[in-house]
Each structure stands twice: as C-alpha cells, then as structure tokens.
Amino acid sequence: MSPWRVWLLAMILVSFSGASQVKRAPEGGAARAGPVLEEAAALLEAGNFPAAEAAARRAVRLAPDWAVARNVLGIVLDQLGRGKGAEAEYRTALRLDPAFAGARNNLGNLLLRQGQLPEARAEFERVLKADPNHAQAHFNLGSVLAAQQQFSAATDHFGAAWKLRGAEADPGVVLAFVSAALRAERPQEALSAAGELARAHATDARILFSLAVALAEGGQYEAAADRFAAVNRLRPHTPEVLYNLGVAYFNLQRMEEAARVLAESADLDPRPAETHFRLGLIASERSEHENAVLELKHAIERVPNRAQHHYMLGREYFRMAYWEGAAGAYQRATDLDPGQALYLLSLGNAQFRASRYQQASQAFLRAAKIDPSLPEINYLIGYTLRAQGKFEEARAYFERHLAIAPGHVDSQASLGYLALEQGRYTEAEEFLQQALQGSPNHLGAQFDLARVYAKQRNYPKAIAAFEHIIEISPDHPQAHYQLYLLYARAGQKVEAQVALAEFKRLEELEKKARDAQMRLDKVRTMRLSGAAGDEVPQRDGAGQPATLPPPGGI
C-alpha cells in the first residue's frame, strides 16, 4: 500500500457525514426547506444518493439562497461522482456565506481529490485562519502537505487534529500522523503514537493491519512485524497478512521465519505473483538457486510482463552459469523496460559469457547511451570489440576508459594485448609493464609480456617470464606450450619434452572437463527449460560480476 493510500484511508475514516452539515433553516419563507433538507441528510447517510439528490434539490428550490442547502446538495453530487456540479454548489454556498467552514472544507477535499493541491491548501488555510482549532481543517491541510512531500509540516497538522479530537480521535488521524512522522524522520513520535493506537485497538485487526503497513512503509520493520503478527493471531491463516509478515521478516533478515510464513501464504492462495517472487528472493539469499528459479517462474507465469521478475530470473541463471537462460531472461526484462541500463548491462554480461560478442557489445552500447556514467562501461564495450577482432574500435574505448579511470589495470593490459597483436611490440611492453606495476600477479598481462619477449626473439627473457607464470599458475597449459616452443628454439631438448608432456596432460584434462561441462550444460538446459533431466545443475554461487573477466591474451 502506498503512502497516499494510507492517507486516503485516513481521510475516509474521518470524513464528515451529511447530517452533521444541517443547521436550522432561517426564519421566513425558507423555513419550509428545513425538514426537506433533514430528509436529504438522512437519505445521504443511508447511502441512498439518488433520493438524497432529489430531496436536496427540493430544499434548494424552496430556499435557493440558503448556504446549508447548497452545501448538502454539493455533498450528494460529490458522492455521485459529479465533481463539477458539486464544486459549483460549494462555491455558491461560500458566496452566500463566506464563513461557512463546512462548505470550504468540502470544496477543499474535492480539489484535493482532483489533484489541485495548491487550491485545496488555500481553502484549508482560510478555514484555519478563521478558526485555528478546527480539527478537520488541520487534518485536511496535513493531507495536502503530505501529498506535497512536506512531511514535517504535515505531521504537525495531523498532530494538531489528533490533539483537538482528544480521546475521541479517529484512528485514521493517528495513522496519518504515524505515516507522515516516519517520512519526516521523526521515528520516536511515530512509534509512540503507533503504540498508543495499538493499545487502544488491540482487537481490531483492520486498524492494526493498516498501522503495520504504515510502519513497514516507513522502514520500521521490527514494529511492523509485531503488528502483523498480532493481526495473524486475531485472524490466523489470512494470506495477505502472512505475505506482509513474511516481507517484514525478510527486511529484518529473518529468512527462516520469512520463508515459513510466505510458504503458508502461497499454500493458502497460490495466485498472487508477489508471494512467489518473494519466496524466490529468499531462496536466492540462501543460495538455493534451483528453488529461486522455480519460484520466480511461478511469479512470471502469473504476471508475465513484469520486467523485474525476468531480471531476477536472469540473475539466478547467471549465478548457475546457465548463460543462455540468463541472456534470454535479461533480454525479456529489457524488452519490457528498455530504459533500464542495469538490465542492458546484465544482458551484455550474459551474452559475452555465451560467446555472443556482437550482441554483448550492442547491449553495452545501449546501456552507455542511457547512462554514460556507468562504471567501467567503456572497458566492457572495448573488451567485447576486442573479442570480435575489432582492434581499432576496441582501442578507442580502452583509451577513453583510461582517461576517466587512470591506472585501470585491465584497460592497460588490453591495450598491451592489442598493440602486441598489431605488431607494436615496444608500445605493448610499455602498457603491459604499467599494468603489472598496478597488479604484479595479473596473469593476462604477464602472459602477453612473455609473448612480447618471444616476438622480439629475446628467448632467455621470454623463458624466464613463462617460468614465472608457471610458478604462480602451475596448471596454465598455454604457458607450458609456449615454454616447449622456446626450449626447443634454445636447444634445451629435455626441458622441451617435459614442457610438451605437461601441456598434453593438461590439455587432456581440459578436454575432459569441457566434455563434462557440455554434458552438464545440456542437462541443465533441459532441466531449467522444463524438460526431463537427472543431474543437478551446477551451483557455483559466484553471483553476478560487475565486469567481464580480465583479459587473458593468448
């Protein structure tokens, strides 16, 4: 429930009744209108609006200059949804009696509902100028101020209305006070009022629920959870109550309790998508990715066009290293909400992981167009262009990123790689040395620097560089292969054979790992897309990286 709905509920709870507007008719010919107007007011309170309108119009015909009759007719037309007619009657009443506070309040309320906030505010301020102790005007002015985001002033006026009403205060006034005070960052006053309201209405589930919603929207999740739990005791097994209680527990990081009550809510009423979405978020927090996928799919089945649901499904697929599924879900989120740079950034990452480099660069370019300030966006575009072999375009983006973030190691390493591939060995060495100054164990930069030495035919230096890589990463197959070539050129036959044997061993292990991964990916695709499968999808739990992996350079 939005803050506006809380205030609207409060307004309804404290609205005037028609009968309270009726005064005695003036002496003379208009005296006959009094009984007719009382009949109109009784019909209005009974909810018989057509009959109330007929009676009010008779009273107006009998006493066209009686402000009270005009006001009651305005109230009836207001209730019938005929705003223009109601406004005309309220204004006529005020022309006849400018001090008629009831008519002015009614006009202000009509203007407020129509969204004419400055005009409504002016009407309520006029009432309070004439009568500073007018409780209803304080409440109404507080409603306008809250709608204008002036929460501290709104809190003061709601508080004045509450004080003036005293022990007879409507709960709606206190609800409005609590909601505004929380948004005005006056939590102690809000919590004190909430406690007083809860004690006064300890057995009223409706009021306690509205109070809990106001507390939750104000970030007071502990107090909100207590109130939702109280409502749950009064009305056990109510899905909406359980859902809100589960969300409060979730915000308090009480995941076990959140999962329990949300699961009960879903069992009682499996239709709401939001319950399944929240269960998916809880499963995600607990790294239960399969359960998260299942619940998010349930949410999407119920509400197919909510972009955030598809985005979160993509995130779970990404965490499971199911790149195709992640790319598909992110694409759907982007289709539904094309203006979200985050969705495009995530889509680019997934497309890159799926080796669809052109699509990845297109996604990153669209993200940069929406938000050029995205961290590392130029590096990401450059890296996808590099993967496509578009070296000059990639170089421009890496240089652009270095201009924004001087010393960015991966951009320096990538520029070194590009210079190496284009035969500019001196420039390549310079960039790679810069990268290694910032990150001495950067394997991509070390490998490319060793390749530079090899291209320059400085074999001793190249051998030493590749041997250093193997010290850091003994299972680096390409380092062993490069050493085999260099040892052979240097006439070190024994060392060359050892390096070649190790390369072949590591290559065989990698081949087996790739084959196993392909089988696992096939099963994962079948299972996550709804087809049969026996194996359990991989759970790497790595989460979605902010950037692509650092360049390797082979």
Image (spheres, rainbow, N blue to C red):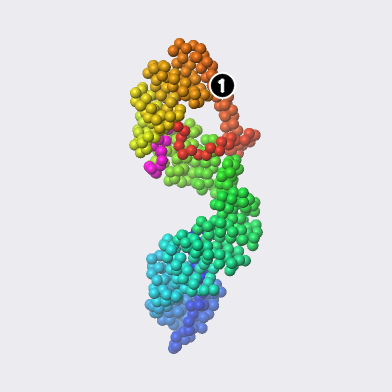
Assess disc 1: are there few (<14), some (14-19) or many (≥20) residues with their C-alpha within 10 Å of its C-alpha: few
Confirm whether residue 296 shows in the render: no
Which residue is depicted at the point 58% across and 35% down?
538
Q: Secondary structure at mark 1?
A: helix
- Magenta-span inclusion, residue 215: no
Which residue is depicted at the point 48% across and 74% down?
164
**Residue 176: image x %, image y %?**
49, 65
Question: Which residues are the magenta region?
Answer: 371-384
**Residue 264: image x %, image y %?**
64, 52
Which residue is depicted at the point 46% across and 19% down?
482
Q: Which of these two is toward me, 511 or 180?
A: 180
Confirm whether residue 135 shows in the render: yes
Which residue is depicted at the point 55% across and 72% down?
47
Quadrant of the image containing the C terminus? top left
- Magenta-span inclusion, residue 381: yes
- Above or below, comparing residue 372 to residue 162 in the picture: above
- Above or below, comparing residue 358 to residue 227 in the picture: above
Q: Judge from the rendering whether residue 478 lies leftward or rightward of residue 271; answer left or right.
A: left
Q: Name the residue beneath numbered marker 1.
A: 508
Farthest residue to the bottom: give it.
Answer: 28
- Above or below, comparing residue 466 to residue 494 in the picture: below
